[in-house]
Image (cartoon, rainbow, N blue to C red):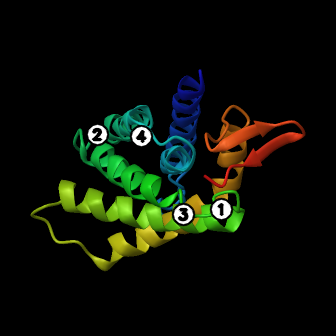
């Protein structure tokens, strides 16, 4: 049920992202909400199913962009893999850490996408400025998306104790 909620929320964020483009907002001002969901999965779901859902989120963006099928999906899996391994060492309950990780993940996913999709085309400074703006706006929506996903998710390294959840030292 949690994974279905994540995909449905990603689909709603994709619709909002498309609506923002149709409202003639500049491209750098449109956040990558699906990537925020993929980063959340990296923090809270360290499994093959988490990687699969990150791939599906990237595939949703690929299918809606109409460029190629695959570059965003590959970029999201790369981002998921890197931050899933790092999430065990980060204090992921902090909003500032989550916002910083989303900003870095947006830049990383954009770099992987540009490398895969525009292999033989020149990348301009405008492309990098667009990624920087998207990193900033994506980090600003992170607390809202994380709060929505945390309402149905529970971190696996919490052991139930008598008086509530306690983080396990093991």
Which residue: 68% across, 68% down? 96
Tag 3 and tag 1, C-beta contact below 8 Å: no
> In terms of image quadrants, where is residue 119?
bottom left
Residue matched to label 1: 140
Tag 4 and tag 2, C-beta contact below 8 Å: no
Q: Earlier in the sequence, mark 1 or mark 4?
A: 4
Residue 163, position as x, y percentages in the image: 90, 40
> Helix, strand, or loop for circle 1?
helix
Q: Quadrant of the N terminus?
A: top right
Q: Earlier in the sequence, mark 4 or mark 2?
A: 4
Q: Nearer the viewer, residue 71 or 38?
A: 38
Q: Which mark is residue 54?
A: 4
> Helix, strand, or loop for circle 4?
helix
Residue matched to label 3: 89
Vertical order, 96 against 37 (above or below):
below
Q: As drawn, which residue projects farthest toward the right?
A: 163
Q: As drawn, which residue projects farthest toward the bottom?
A: 125
Circle 3 Cα neighbour tier, 10 Å, few/some/many (<14 / 14–19 / ≥20): few
Q: Earlier in the sequence, mark 2 or mark 1?
A: 2
Residue 71, position as x, y percentages in the image: 25, 48
| Distance of label 4 from label 3 (alpha carbons) | 20 Å
Residue matched to label 2: 66
Q: Earlier in the sequence, mark 3 or mark 1?
A: 3
């Amino acid at each position: 049920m949690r994974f279905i909620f994540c995909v449905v929320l990603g689909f709603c964020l994709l619709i909002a992202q498309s609506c923002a483009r149709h409202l003639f907002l500049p491209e750098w001002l449109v956040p990558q909400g699906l990537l925020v969901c993929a980063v959340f999965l990296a923090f809270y779901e360290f499994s093959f199913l988490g990687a699969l859902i990150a791939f599906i989120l990237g595939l949703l963006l690929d299918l809606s962009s109409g460029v190629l099928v695959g570059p965003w999906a590959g970029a999201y899996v790369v981002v998921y893999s890197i931050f899933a391994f790092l999430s065990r060492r980060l204090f992921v309950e902090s909003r500032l850490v989550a916002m910083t990780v989303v900003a870095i993940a947006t830049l990383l996913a954009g770099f992987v996408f540009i490398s895969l999709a525009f292999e033989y085309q020149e990348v301009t400074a405008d492309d990098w400025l667009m990624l920087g703006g998207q990193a900033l706006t994506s980090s600003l929506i992170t607390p809202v998306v994380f709060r929505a996903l945390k309402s149905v998710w529970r971190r696996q390294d919490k052991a139930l104790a008598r008086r509530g959840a306690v983080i396990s030292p093991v």
